[in-house]
Image: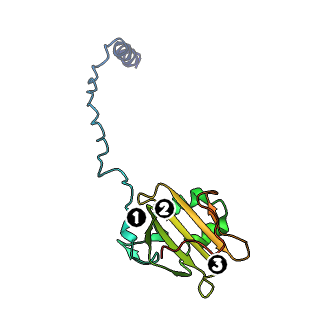
């Protein structure tokens, strides 16, 4: 038995002095570069002029003017009042067809059955980058423009494009 344990111990010690087995060298694979965005792959500025002649609540290519992301973002940038923003971007109300006005796309709408005393307009560049919003409530003496000073306030409401 002593002989067997000695032999086992010698075998274990011999294994400790053995050179390590060679490991395969990892190969490096060159990373495939990501393609750079092409003009068609980047988010192109919308052409809001496609809404001219349509009502702001009509679907054009699957989207309403008031739901257009560029319109919503532009209105959010210039109108700090959440109540005015919600009214201007809502689908409730009566509207005129979208029109071209002073180099901009103009969407005018009003409170149903109360258009004279309560109306609003979005005047936005065709690419959606720059907007101004008019809001008129007869309880105030004149219309308000966002941003302030975009146009002179009018005592009789917002421009309708007519």
Q: Nearest the camera: 76 or 51? A: 51
Crowd class of label 3 (few under 14; some 14 to 19; many from 20; radius 10 Å): many
**Picture layout, residue 67 above or below residue 8:** below
Q: Quadrant of the N terminus?
A: top left
The Cα atoms of the two marked residues, 1 and 3, are separated by 25 Å
Q: Going 29% across and 34% down the picture, which residue do you hit? A: 31
Crowd class of label 2 (few under 14; some 14 to 19; many from 20; radius 10 Å): many
Left or right of 144 on screen, residue 99: left
- Residue 134: image quadrant is bottom right
Left or right of 154 on screen, residue 28: left
Of marks 2 and 3, which one's residue comes earlier in the chain?
Answer: 3
Q: Going 35% across and 50% down the picture, which residue do you hit? A: 42
**Picture layout, residue 57 above or below residue 23:** below
Q: Which residue is mark 2?
A: 124
Left or right of 119 on screen, residue 22: left
Q: Going 63% across and 56% down the picture, which residue do you hit? A: 149
Color scheme of the displayed model: rainbow
Q: Nearest the camera: 53 or 47? A: 53
Judging from the image, what secondary structure is the residue with disc 3 in?
strand
Judging from the image, what secondary structure is the residue with disc 2 in?
strand
Q: Which residue is mark 3?
A: 118
Q: Going 47% across and 54% down the picture, which residue do you hit? A: 129
Of marks 1 and 3, which one's residue comes earlier in the chain?
Answer: 1
Q: Nearest the camera: 5 or 112? A: 112
Q: Which residue is mark 1?
A: 48
The Cα atoms of the two marked residues, 2 and 3, are separated by 20 Å
Q: In the orientation shown, which residue stands out farthest toward the top?
A: 17
Q: Position of residue 95 (x, y in %)?
A: 51, 80
Q: Nearest the camera: 148 or 111? A: 148
Q: Position of residue 153 (x, y in %)?
A: 64, 65
């Amino acid at each position: 038995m002593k002989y067997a344990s000695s032999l086992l111990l010698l075998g274990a010690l011999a294994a400790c002095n053995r050179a390590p087995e060679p490991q395969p060298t990892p190969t490096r694979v060159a990373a495939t570069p990501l393609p750079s965005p092409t003009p068609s792959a980047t988010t192109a500025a919308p052409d809001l002029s496609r809404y001219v002649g349509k009502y702001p609540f009509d679907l054009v290519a699957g989207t309403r003017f008031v739901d257009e992301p560029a319109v919503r973002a532009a209105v959010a940038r210039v109108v700090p009042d959440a109540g005015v923003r919600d009214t201007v971007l809502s689908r409730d109300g009566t509207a005129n067809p979208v029109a071209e006005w002073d180099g901009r796309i103009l969407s005018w709408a009003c409170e149903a059955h109360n258009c004279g005393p309560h109306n609003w307009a979005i005047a936005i560049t065709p690419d959606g980058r720059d907007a101004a919003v008019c809001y008129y409530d007869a309880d105030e003496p004149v219309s308000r423009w966002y941003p302030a000073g975009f146009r002179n306030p009018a005592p009789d409401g917002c421009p309708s494009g007519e």
